Amino acid sequence: MTTSKVLVLLIAAIGLTACTEQLEIVPADDEVSALPESKRLHQFREIRVPPVVTSGDLSGTGVRIAIVGEIVDPNHPDLEGRIAKQFNSFVSRGELLPGIGSEPMLFEKYGANSGHGTHIAGIIAANCDGKGIQGIACGARMDVYDIGVYEQAAEFVRTGWDAAAGDSMQQIIIAAATAIDGITNRGISRIATGSFNIETPAVRLQHGGPLQDLSMTEIRKALESHDNSMSKIVSAGLVRLVDPADAVILDRVAVASSDEDFVRTAPFLQKSLEWRDLTKAIARFQRADGVYITTESNNLFEDRSSLLNALPSLASNVDPGLWLSVVLAVPSDVMNDTAKRPRQPDQDSTTNTVRPSMPSLHTPLNTCGRLAADYCILTPSYDVSSTMTEKVAERGMPLFRLDERDYQIFSGHSMGAPMVAATLALMEEKNQRSGYGYDMKILVQMLKTSANRQFPNYDRVKHGWGMLDVTAALEAMDSEATERDAAKREDSGSHNRRMPDGDVTHVANETS
């Protein structure tokens, strides 16, 4: 099979906090415990991964997936052969360090605490070799771009710049934009998924004003002189809001947050030069028929999307049809179970011809939000068991073991983005294999419209398009092809016109 030039881009979540939370404290008496069977691949049932995928017959083969965020442990047996390349995208003092897109990122040097990236990689493409766990797109391969978000990498960035050169978020946004541009330049991308976010509500600002096109550092200094208060900043004429009521709401949300100053000031960063470069990089990727997927933040913002998740509603150059925001959703029966055990359906949902209804779904970390609801999808990214580097044991994190392989159980939006990325990889492989010729915007639309909204408390603002459904998404590709073929036949028949003398003359279909 010819390898299709496809890439799924996953940007690890920042906010500046990770979109990874332990919804339950996993007990572990010893440093290493057996991985509970009940927690092995339960998300496959929740998102209806079909037998053609679990058997490995459809596996994302030929799709290249890039994880942008944190380095991955390539030595885990589940990831053997799955990691193509790893790159260093660190930024220091506003300049890229050596390694971006050229020199390999050395796991031995930087990967001592590479837990988050390794976990994500396993969700996407852990080998389907009959041992341990299995990734949703187990035939895909991955490129990794470390932008200094987590662990030692983040510490490396923090010690590489000073206050005069900017702050950590500035450095990470520069690195992310550069990495995305680098991926686009390589010309192998059609699918991009990002879990990069900013822990502050999306607030729409009018273009122009004194803050427009300043650096993040300059904007922060200007805001500090007005006590970082949205109301004072607006009154001083530094910015103008599309909705004036946002000033009061943002101040109220900031007071309730764990980092009040950050929540107050972060919305204004969309005025900055760095933010402009990030949106340009994303827009350029989309113009190459690439879809970008991001994850929500961990803070509830009164049903308001986070800043990056609502990007198409804030930046006119970002295409909403090639953008997906991912939110963690937990079934009510799991939320009410103090042990938070994954649900065990009475029947294998992947073999049902009729999609089952679900219990009510709760979004404990954040909702889709008003601005991002049109491009938001839910995932059951709770209690997700996936690959983990043994190096995390060195800093006291307990490990689980199955078939002599190491795993960890995490919950969060971050675990949902790779599920969506892998599903799109499956769709793209089927697209190539079947010769359907769908462009990426059509595939994304199929993914959204096929999501499951059959649960009692469905709400458009909170739940967007509903729960990811792999079986329905793959079936939608066949249904669309059937309808398209029928339309072509009907169109061809309309070109058979009866001539005045009663003879039938065939007029060639101009689209054939």
Image (cartoon, helix red, strand yellow):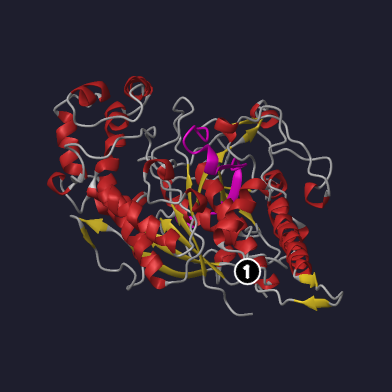
Q: Is residue 381 on the magenta stretch?
A: yes
Name the side, left or right, on which 304 lies relative to 457. left
Question: Which residue has dot 1 on it?
Answer: 437
Residue at 18 percent across and 43 percent down: it is: 217
Quadrant where the C terminus sits is: bottom right
Name the side, left or right, on which 416 lies relative to 48. left
Q: Position of residue 174 (x, y in %)?
A: 28, 54
The correct choice, above or below, for 45 with respect to 27 in the image is below
Name the side, left or right, on which 8 lies relative to 509. left
Q: Position of residue 313 (x, y in %)?
A: 42, 41
Q: Is residue 155 visible?
A: no
- Front position in the image: 41 or 30: 41
Quadrant where the N terminus sits is: bottom right
Q: Position of residue 106 (x, y in %)?
A: 36, 67
In the image, farthest residue toward the right: 502
Q: Is residue 84 on the magenta stretch?
A: no
Name the side, left or right, on which 140 lies relative to 212. right
